[in-house]
Amino acid sequence: MNFSIRPMKQNNLIEALAAGPLCGDGAMGTLLMARGMAGGSCGMAWNIDQPEDVIAIHRAYREAGSRLITTNSFGGSRFILALHGRAADVRDLNIAAAKVARTAAGDDAWVLGDVGPCGDFLEPVGDLTEDEVRDAFRDQIEGLIAGGADAILVETMSDPGEMILGIEAAHACDPNIPVIATYAFQKTADGGFRTMMGSTVADAIGKAVDAGAAVVGANCGSSLDLDDYVTLCKEIVVAGGPAHVIIQPNAGAPQQVGGQTVYLATPAQMADTARRLLDAGARIIGGCCGTTPEHLAAIAKAVAM
């Protein structure tokens, strides 16, 4: 298969956000599973073994109106890939992830190189040192940039310390590449929002901005409903100062139905939430768990209005 790896001009993303809001994309893992991926297997391997399936998912989001296409590389660090016996393949798998996303994105959308948590905690809570995590992020991000990523998305973080290391690693690879930084926030008993590590919105977002993130926000709050994301967005806008804000909500709060976790928000509900997020100050709106191309088509229409 021939891949296009021509990246967009990186700074154009920030210029575009200054001009108007953009629509992100949605979930990847659930759509891979719908195509036959076994639970617990290495989804990144599909970038090499079954790239047509990954491209088809990316294209479905692009055709729905997504202008930001996220690589299939959430578990792309050496720590996560080691669980699948693929730690030696970090560079190849991340290059492939960016190439297939670039092919689907075409010349009028941006590819976001997706970087998720390393899967353990930094010392002294966990066993990972800052140098180990920074090096692991850098290895992954080098592959994503080599494959054609226009920006780096460091996402679903709970520890601002790990977030800072991800941002620093991205800028060590390319000082000019835009970095998008998102946390997973939970709602507290008093109605506020904190990460799993206990960080407040002001602390977590402020540290990401200070580290050099151009876009900051939230995704995948497992206990949040759609109203919560709007309230959270307002807090992030205040905490983010000059940075643009991205919100990528799940398709509503997760529900247990027949022993399975499901997300029940409809495309119309997601579109209504998108309009409220725009009013609250968000500049990028996408989706996380439970979202599909149908949800993103509705969001894209709302963002374009």
Image (cartoon, grey):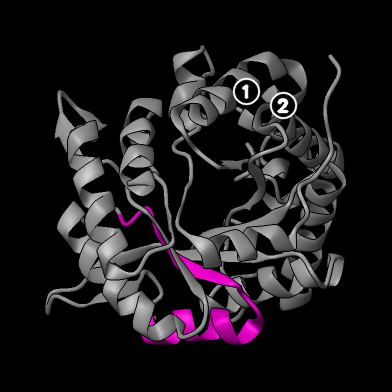
Using the numbered discs, state the Cα–Cα distance from disc 1 to disc 2 in whole angstroms: 6 Å
Tag 1: amino acid: Val
Circle 2 residue:
47
Residue 234 sits in quarter: bottom left
The label number, if any, that marks residue 186 in the structure image: none
Identify the residue at horizontal 76%, vertical 64% (top origin).
177
For residue 7, which quarter of the picture? Answer: top right
The structure residue drawn at horizontal position 65% and vertical position 41%, both measured from the top left corner, is: 73
Q: Bounds of the magenta span?
A: 201-221
| Disc 2 residue type (three-letter) | Asn
Dot 2 falls on a residue whose secondary structure is helix
Q: Is residue 155 visible?
A: yes
> How many labels, in total?
2
Where residue 91 sits in the image (x, y, percent)?
85, 44
Q: Earlier in the sequence, mark 1 or mark 2?
A: 2
Check disc 1 and report the residue beneath it.
54
Q: Are marks 1 and 2 in contact (CB under 8 Å)?
A: yes
Mark 1 closeness class: few <14, some 14–19, many ≥20 residues within 10 Å = many
Work out whether residue 151 or residue 164 is closer to the camera in this orientation and state it: 151
